[in-house]
Amino acid sequence: MDETQNSTERIVLFLDESDDRAWKAATIAERLDLETDAVSAILSRLKERDLVRHKGSFWTITDDEERLRAAYRLHRHHKNADGQYGEERLEEIETEDMEVVS
């Protein structure tokens, strides 16, 4: 396992590498040593972006390869920018002119 990958990356790679099968969230969680609730939440977010498909209790990667490649490129771009410039933290960029929003 690549320790630099986050849970979302690990799930997408797992599904992409086993694109001939559909998996239950609990099985994905077990295989990747993640919490089932976390995997379910991530899968739901990925489904909203049309990066995974869901039928019954089974999940699989999208068959839209261009969409998947575009999402991966965007993700890599953001990850590279974070690595090069550092992740932005709101408390580090606050100014006196900023309003507090509640």
Image (tube, helix red, strand yellow):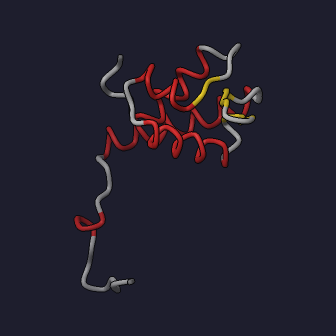
Q: Position of residue 64 (x, y in %)?
A: 76, 30
Q: Quadrant of residue 54?
A: top right
The number of numbered badges drawn on the structure is 0
Quarter of the image where the C terminus is located: bottom left
32 on left or right of 90 = right
Q: Position of residue 45 (x, y in %)?
A: 58, 47
Residue at 65 percent across and 35 percent down: it is 70
Quarter-wise, where is residue 22 in the image?
top right
Q: Position of residue 34 (x, y in %)?
A: 39, 31
In the picture, measured across the screen, residue 70 lies left or right of residue 84, that is: right
Residue visible at 70% across and 13% down?
20
| In front of the other: 17 or 23 | 23
**Measuring 59% from the left and 22% from the top, which residue is drawn there?**
15
Q: Residue at x 68, y 16 (%)?
A: 21
Q: Is residue 11 above or below residue 44?
A: above
- The spot of residue 57 in percent (x, y) is 67, 34
Front-lying residue, 41 or 91: 41
The vertical placement of 50 against 95, above or below, is: above
Give the side of residue 9 with respect to residue 18, left or right: left
Q: Quadrant of residue 25?
A: top right
Q: Quadrant of the N terminus?
A: top left
- Of residues 17 and 92, the one drawn nearer to the viewer in this rendering: 17
Instruction: Give the answer, above or below, for where 41 lies relative to 27.
Output: below
Q: Is residue 61 above or below residue 91?
A: above
